[in-house]
């Protein structure tokens, strides 16, 4: 299987705070990887390093064989030049916890501007695809709406459509339902499940344990900046081996 | 001395006031943006210099600044400038002073945009310029509109300060007529003019604000 993402020996500190300690992770085409773990364990930082919002101190970051960053002899991450990074950015998309839609743009413009402006793609084609995406998200009637006129769940679906419009090889989600009212989380989880069924490559940070178990092919439990345990989702969630995993999961079982 | 005569004499002054107003905005609004960039620069010395100048420009009277711009070239460099420099000095003085105020307004507007907007743009591949002009600037404009309106209204009244350079804008003219004719009527008429001028400005700004209220 083709590797879409490879992170080797990633280290990241904020000042004296070692947030990621020697994290390695690889995601193959069509694979869905979930990352779970207590708050402050470094999950967001890992996604932010992967999406170039943070720079790793050490390690490799590779998309489809292209190095965004390569560890030198001492393990220090050396990033590629501007053009390399810009090219690498085409490979991934990120869905934020709080959507981060552009409030001054209509739904349609939120989705279409990036492929047209950044992807330099044909306008009509992009609009046609955007309409398809909106239909798929159940938002066909919302293309002229502004984000402030939508519910949180609808905004998050728009932000997923915005990410998908760039046709990324891999899509990251950072707690996509955490900012939503409980009754709205279901609609987002369903959208992600549908994407998984279409073999979209995804990395999902989530606190929805049963969702993570059902949707993913591989699950990672992080705590204190390290991967404590990883493996088959059903196995890890039903029969955790490590004490820290057990303690964490027991807090989610009613 | 009847009202029509006073009005006729004041018209030229009104035109001059309007010209100061328009040119000051024309130069100070973009200049303010450049100054705001300098103020937010990662290059610390530039940031400190700009911060210092903004403090001076906001902390001293505009009237004094106009005098410095006007007399500075002579007293500092011995330059004798033609009479037409009077008008240039007025515009330069106003534009620089207002740029300082606009810069601080823009800066607070830019800094109030959530970090997530930059991050969303960065992940989608927007470069710095695209992020600023497509995403940040339009949202900033909406946010700074109320304080900018305040400044613009202040500017209408401040145009009268050009009198210190005996530039013949409306207030100067009104004062001259009033002194010559020993009547306060010209000053009263000037007051009405400033008031109407401001009402028009306030109305226009309100329209712009309405136009931008399609999103939150
Ligand atoms: N920009 C930052 N500056 C300093 N510390 C940060 C920053 N971002 C995250 N951290 C710290 O990194 C640790 C991990 O945070 P985060 O990756 O957000 O965890 P999680 O997403 O698992 O809750 C926390 O201790 C947090 O305080
Ligand atoms: Mg987080």
Image: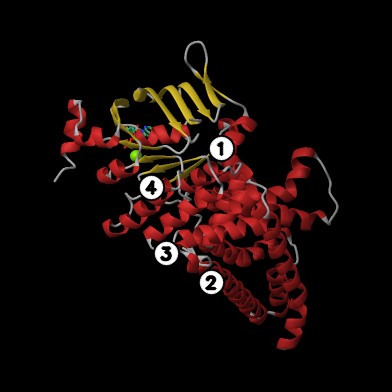
In the displayed orientation, state which residue is furthest to the top.
A73
Residue denoted by label 2: B210
Which residue is depicted at the point 65% across and 82% down? B185
Q: CA distance from mark 2 to mark 1?
A: 38 Å
Which residue is depicted at the point 50% across and 46% down? B120
Q: Name which quarter of the figure residue A19 lies in.
A: top left
- Tell me the element at label 3: loop
Q: CA distance from mark 4 to mark 1?
A: 20 Å
Residue denoted by label 3: A150
The vertical placement of B105 against B78, above or below, is below
Task: Say which chain tag 4 marks.
Answer: A
- Circle 3 Cα neighbour tier, 10 Å, few/some/many (<14 / 14–19 / ≥20): some
Given residues B68 and B198, the one toward you in this image is B198
Numbered mark located on residue A89 in the image: 1
Which residue is depicted at the point 51% across and 49% down? A164
Are discs 2 and 1 both within one chain?
no
Answer with mark 3 or mark 1, whichever residue precedes in sequence.
1
A179 to the left or right of A69:
left
Answer with mark 4 or mark 3, whichever residue precedes in sequence.
4
Are discs 3 and 1 both within one chain?
yes
Q: Quadrant of ligand 1?
A: top left
Residue denoted by label 4: A97
Q: CA distance from mark 3 to mark 2?
A: 21 Å
Are discs 3 and 2 both within one chain?
no
Task: Say which chain tag 2 marks.
Answer: B
């Amino acid at each position: 299987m083709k590797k879409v993402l490879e992170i080797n020996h990633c280290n990241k500190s904020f000042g004296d705070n070692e947030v990621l300690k020697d994290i390695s992770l690889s995601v193959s085409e069509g694979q869905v990887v979930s990352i779970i773990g207590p708050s402050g364990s470094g999950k967001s930082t890992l996604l932010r390093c992967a999406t170039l919002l943070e720079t790793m101190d050490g390690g490799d970051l590779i998309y489809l064989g292209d190095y965004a960053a390569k560890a030198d002899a001492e393990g220090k991450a050396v990033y590629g030049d501007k053009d390399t990074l810009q090219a690498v950015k085409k490979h991934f998309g990120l869905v934020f916890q709080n959507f981060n839609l552009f409030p001054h743009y209509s739904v349609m413009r939120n989705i279409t501007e990036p492929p047209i402006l950044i992807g330099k793609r044909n306008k009509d084609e992009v609009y046609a695809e955007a309409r398809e995406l909106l239909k798929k998200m159940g938002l066909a009637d919302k293309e002229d709406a502004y984000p402030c006129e939508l519910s949180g769940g609808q905004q998050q679906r728009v932000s997923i459509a915005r990410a998908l419009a760039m046709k990324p090889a891999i899509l990251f989600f950072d707690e996509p339902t955490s900012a939503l009212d409980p009754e709205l989380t279901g609609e987002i989880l369903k959208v992600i499940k549908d994407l998984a069924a279409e073999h979209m490559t995804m990395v999902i940070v989530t606190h929805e344990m049963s969702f993570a178990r059902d949707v993913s092919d591989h699950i990672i439990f992080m705590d204190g900046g390290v991967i404590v345990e990883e493996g088959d989702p059903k196995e890890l969630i039903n029969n955790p081996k490590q004490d820290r995993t057990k303690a964490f999961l027991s807090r989610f079982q009613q | 001395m009847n009202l029509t005569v006073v009005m006729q004499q004041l018209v030229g002054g009104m035109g001059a006031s309007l010209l100061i107003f328009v040119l000051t905005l024309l130069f100070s609004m973009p200049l303010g943006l450049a100054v705001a960039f300098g103020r937010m620069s990662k290059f610390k010395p530039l940031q400190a210099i700009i911060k210092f100048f903004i403090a001076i420009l906001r902390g001293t009277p505009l009237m004094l600044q106009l005098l410095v711009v006007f007399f500075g070239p002579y007293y500092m460099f011995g330059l004798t400038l033609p009479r037409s420099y009077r008008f240039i000095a007025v515009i330069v003085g106003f534009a620089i002073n207002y740029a300082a105020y606009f810069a601080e307004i823009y800066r607070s507007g830019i800094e109030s945009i959530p970090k997530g907007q930059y991050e969303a743009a960065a992940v989608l591949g927007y470069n710095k310029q695209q992020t600023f002009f497509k995403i940040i600037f339009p949202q900033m404009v909406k946010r700074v509109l109320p304080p900018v309106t305040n400044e613009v209204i202040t500017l209408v009244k401040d145009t009268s300060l050009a009198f210190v350079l005996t530039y013949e804008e409306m207030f100067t003219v009104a004062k001259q007529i009033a002194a010559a004719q020993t009547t306060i009527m010209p000053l009263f008429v000037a007051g009405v003019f400033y008031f109407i001028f401001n009402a028009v400005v306030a109305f226009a700004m309100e329209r712009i604000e309405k136009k931008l209220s399609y999103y939150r």
